[in-house]
Image (cartoon, rainbow, N blue to C red):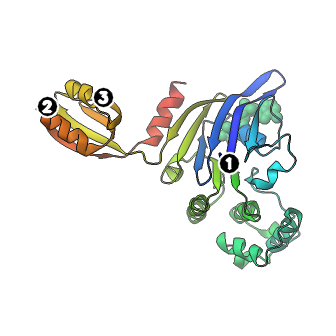
Amino acid sequence: MEALRLEGLGKRYGRKPVLQGVSLSVRPGEVYALAGPNGSGKTTLIRLITGLAFPTEGRALLLGEDVHKSPKARRHLGALVEAPAAFYPYLTGRENLRMQAFLAGVREEGRIGEVLARLKLLSVADQKVGSYSLGQRQRLGLAAAILHRPKVLVLDEPTSGLDPEGVALVHGLLQELAQEGVAVLLSTHHLQEVSPYAHKVGILGGGRLLDEVALSGREVFRLEAHPPEGALALLKGLPQVASARLQGEAILFEGNPEAVLEALLKEGYRVKALHPERFDLLSYYQERVRHA
Ligand SMILES: Nc1ncnc2c1ncn2[C@@H]1O[C@H](COP(=O)(O)OP(=O)(O)OP(=O)(O)O)[C@@H](O)[C@H]1O
């Protein structure tokens, strides 16, 4: 079952629609990155998923339970929506987490120390949060979000305000949590940071989900064969090729390279080069947003 499922979700402020018909899903262990220009609706979507705002159309389901109808649905959710995350400034980081653990019913001995260590906050755990830097507070926000071992984690720009070490720490943690089976949805302006481990990228533009790009298992190959038009037609007819398109004189394809090579040689094509090509997510995103 999908851990998070959005069905035609939309939000209007007065007569102004800011989100329309957004449908997507995130499975356990999957990382879904939400990208889009400023004002495209990322924060609004995250506020809807976390129950901080009500949709004017559609619904959001957490493990099959409607966030806005079932009061218990949010027990599955860990979230970081505001930056910097809000805490009691006159309490220490550890005391803030202790209070959140109590409210969430977390009784597990040692869990607070564990999340503080995971976010590299042990050295400041007994200092008042009022004295924390922006990055430390953001990391404490993440510690609080994962405290109760949520099955779904929803984060609005979780690396904002972090130094490069903190950015790497957070992305490493999200990757680990996904490997442990957590479904992660995060918004970001930094596609290069998430592309090594995100499974899917959703591109929002003008309040609509313009595109979804699957990244996991995406192996693109670049082929230079002569004549290219004929080779392209041949590739498109092969069952082992999922997609193929011309790029200049070369062909970019997704599929089995051995099968492609064998078919080309058999048909007498001259193959000059065949090698893996990195999928350029940033250029794809820029192109997609430009033509929206
Ligand atoms: N409470 C509100 N009332 C009216 N309009 C709002 C409200 N909240 C958001 N909006 C509008 O909704 C649109 C989407 O805003 P949102 O903050 O969701 O975008 P975003 O993609 O998160 O942007 P950014 O990348 O700048 O964080 C914007 O045009 C914004 O002005």
Which residue does the numbered mark 3 point to in the structure image? Answer: 236
- Residue 112 vertical position relative to residue 212 in the rendered view, above or below: below
Image coordinates of residue 57 in percent, x first then y, are 78, 28
Of callouts 2 and 1, which one flags the residue occurring earlier in the amino acid sequence?
Answer: 1
Marks 2 and 3 sit apart, C-alpha to C-alpha, by: 14 Å
Give the mark, 2 or 3, whose residue is nearer the N terminus.
3
Q: In the picture provided, is 145 more to the left or to the right than 36? A: right
Q: Earlier in the sequence, mark 3 or mark 1?
A: 1
**Amino acid type, mark 3:** Lys
Residue located at (69% from left, 54% from top) = 153
Give the residue at x 27% y 44%. Answer: 257
Q: CA distance from mark 2 to mark 1?
A: 47 Å
Write down the residue under mark 2.
267
What residue did someone put label 1 on?
Answer: 3
Q: Is residue 69 above or below residue 235?
A: below
**Is there a contact, CB below 8 Å, between mark 3 and mark 1?**
no
Q: Is residue 116 left or right of residue 220?
A: right
